[in-house]
Image (spheres, helix red, strand yellow):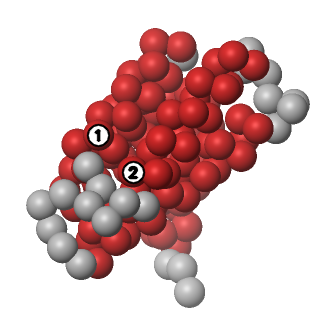
Amino acid sequence: MQTSAQRQAMRAYAAAADARPARAQEAELFRGVGAALRRAAQRDGVARSRALADNERLWTMVIDLLRDPANALPEGLRASIISVGLAVQREMRSTTPDFGFLVAVNENIAAGLDRAG
């Protein structure tokens, strides 16, 4: 059961999120997942698996959204980002994922979203 303070905090967060442009929120998501990957690169076990799983969910969602014919991005850009996403997914599934590569891709996507926003 949520406390009054928790409900108030959730309402405040939702209001703040609504005030920020969608691209800024998307960039923040890529940066957050990238930061978790950076930390996980130095660890084993659960933290590493969780960071990879979060990145997998993020990229699966991105690819699915870009494959939607109703997506307003130009087709060439959508295809390019899907190609990057598939490369990221292949890397995450390797026995020894290159965390530097994964972090760099997420940071570059976040920077692109910042410029586009």
Residue 101 against residue 58 in the figure, above or below = above
SS at badge 2:
helix
Residue 88 image point, x, y percent: 45, 45
Q: Give the amino acid at mark 2.
A: Glu
Q: Is residue 27 left or right of residue 35?
A: right
Per the image, the residue denoted by label 2 is: 91
Q: How many neighbours does mark 1 have within 10 angstroms: few (below 14), some (14-19), or many (20 or more)? A: few
Q: Give the amino acid at mark 1.
A: Phe
At x 67%, y 25%, the residue is 78
- For the question of whether residue 26 can be seen, the reply is no
Residue 85 against residue 3 in the figure, above or below = above
Q: In the rendered structure, are the residues bearing label 1 and label 2 in contact, judged by CB atoms less than 8 Å apart?
A: yes
Identity of the residue furthest to the right in this view: 70
At x 37%, y 60%, the residue is 94
Q: Decide which of 13, 8 is in the foreground and name it.
A: 13
Distance Cα–Cα, label 1 vs label 2: 8 Å
Q: Decide which of 57, 7 is in the foreground and name it.
A: 57
- For the question of whether residue 22 can be seen, the reply is yes
Per the image, the residue denoted by label 1 is: 101
Q: Would you identify the image quadrant in which residue 50 lies?
A: bottom left
Residue 55 against residue 47 in the figure, above or below = above
